Amino acid sequence: MIAIQRSYAVEKNDFTKAGEVSSNIKKIMKQVGVEPEIIRRVSVAAYESEMNIIIHSYGGTIDFMITPEYIKLVACDRGPGIENIELAMKKGYSTAPQNVREMGFGAGMGLPNIKRCSDEFIIESEYKSHTKLVLVFKQSM
Amino acid sequence: MKLSVVKELLNAEVLTGHEQLDRNVTNAYAADLMSDVLSSLDDKTILLTGLTNTHAVRTAEMMDIHSIVFVRGKSPDEETLKMAETNGIVTMKTDMILFVASGILYNEGLRGAVIVR
């Protein structure tokens, strides 16, 4: 397997395109023959990260990399940052507005779910600045 | 349980994937919030939901969920159905409410989706 790297822009409130980045990432993983169980974990983490950028941020990027040893996702936005990370990591805690909940999001499971799916999870957020997620998924080879 | 049996039990109308009703399901997840659905990791799961927009299909796609039942008589829009078609997801709709549809399927042997880790 050769190393593949992709970078995607994700726009604020772009609900019509929501999930396209994750769908793309999933297709690439299928094409190069990543194990189905890992594909699912990466896809769910990518989708939650993509939705987080769309719902909560001013826009950002998702970088995706596959090497034979690991898969890496980096989701970075341009703010406004998370005021209380500990609270945001709590299952069921959500700041999503009502219109977002009506679309099926805002269960307050996003970040805990991303953490559960990944082998390494780093969250860095500065209030009024940005949020960055670095996720690593080991490939058992 | 075959999807054709699910269709009969729920008196459902198949919207996409007519030719794939011989697929088998063993577990089900019933929810309207997709972030909750994304917290289970399990295949051979059928999704029962009142959410009829593209996010229901996207969620199914990410989770390898191959079938969705839309409840409460709601119909998804064309874009949602097209996305389901593209991803090979069987969709059907029933007039039953979520509780009743779930209860019938449970009674006939389907079990809850497994939440791992």
Image (cartoon, grey):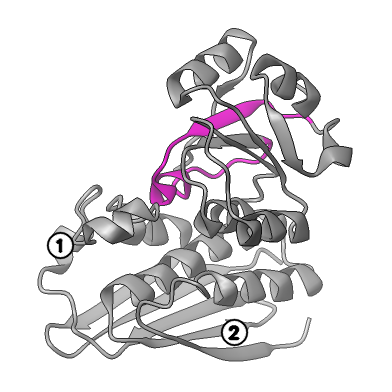
Within 10 angstroms of label 2, few (less than 14), some, or many (20 or more) residues? Answer: some
Residue wearing tag 2: A65
Left or right relative to B96: residue B6 = right
Circle 1 chain:
A
A12 is within the stretch colored magenta: no
Res B82 visible: yes
Residue wearing tag 1: A86
Res A112 visible: no
- State which quadrant residue A19 falls in: bottom right
User: Which quarter of the rendered picture does the C terminus of chain A lie within?
Assistant: bottom right
Q: Position of residue B51 (x, y in %)?
A: 47, 45
Q: Are marks 1 and 2 on the same chain?
A: yes
Q: Which residues are magenta?
A: B24-44
Q: Main secondary structure of the magenta part?
A: loop
Q: Secondary structure at mark 1?
A: helix
Circle 2 chain:
A
Q: Give me the C-alpha separation between circle 1 and circle 2.
A: 28 Å
Reading the chain from its start, which is encountered first: label 1 or label 2?
2
Q: Position of residue B87 (x, y in %)?
A: 74, 58
Q: Position of residue B34 (x, y in %)?
A: 44, 49
Left or right relative to A107: residue A128 = left
User: Which residue appears at 31% of the width and 60% of the height?
Assistant: A100
The amino acid on which the numbered mark 1 sits, given as a three-letter code, is Glu
Q: Position of residue B43 (x, y in %)?
A: 65, 41
- State which quadrant residue B77 falls in: bottom right
